[in-house]
Amino acid sequence: MRQDYNLHASLDDPCQRLLNAMEPGSYIRPHRQLTPPKQERFVRVRGRMAAFIFDGMGKVDEVIVFDPGGGE
């Protein structure tokens, strides 16, 4: 489960800032913002998470695990 809290005034804003609180076991479906291209940043406050980096064909290119017990 996750809950979003938008900090931007409108979906048309060029910079969309939001807080996204996620419970253990949450999943964010892979996606890209292509028009216009946008970057996303995640900040882990606590817990463990993994980022999956895909190549242009949609295959997993890299997995990065962020783990407070040792990893990143």
Image (tube, rainbow, N blue to C red):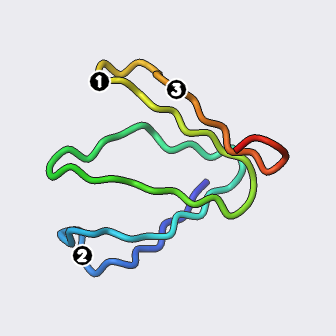
Residue 31 spot, x, y in % from top left? 35, 40
Residue 10, compared with residue 59, is above or below; it is below
**Residue found farthest to the left:** 35
Left or right, 53 with reference to 2:
left
Q: Left or right? Give the position of 21 relative to 28.
A: right
User: Left or right: 59 with respect to 35?
Assistant: right
Please provide percent x and percent y for residue 17. Answer: 38, 71
Image coordinates for residue 61, horizontal then vertical, percent = 46, 22
* 29 vs 66, nearest the viewer: 66
Question: Depth-wise, is mark 3 or mark 2 nearer the camera?
Answer: 3
Question: Which amino acid type is shown beneath numbered disc 3?
Answer: Glu
**Left or right for 7, reference 43:** left
- The answer to which of 13 and 61 lies nearer the viewer is 61
Eyeballing the image, is 49 above or below 15? above
Is the residue marked by circle 1 packed among few (<14), some (14-19), or many (20+) residues within 10 Å?
few
Task: Confirm or deny contact between disc 2 and disc 1 (CB under 8 A).
Answer: no
Residue 55 occupies quadrant: top left
| Front residue (pair 14, 64) | 64
Label 2 neighbourhood size at 10 Å, few (<14), some (14-19), many (20+)?
Answer: few
Mark 3 residue element = strand
Q: Of the residues tagged 2 and 1, which is closer to the observer? A: 1
Q: Which residue is mark 2?
A: 10
Image quarter in which the C terminus is found: top right
Residue found 61% across the figure and 53% down from its top: 1
Residue found at x 47% / y 73%? 5
Which of the marked residues, 3 or 2, is nearer the chain's N terminus? 2
46 up-or-down from 26: above or below = below
The image quarter in which residue 59 lies: top left
Instruction: Give, as a three-letter code, the residue at label 1.
Output: Gly
The span from disc 2 to disc 1 (Cα, nearest Å) is 30 Å
> Dot 3 corresponds to which residue?
62
Q: Which residue is mark 1?
A: 56
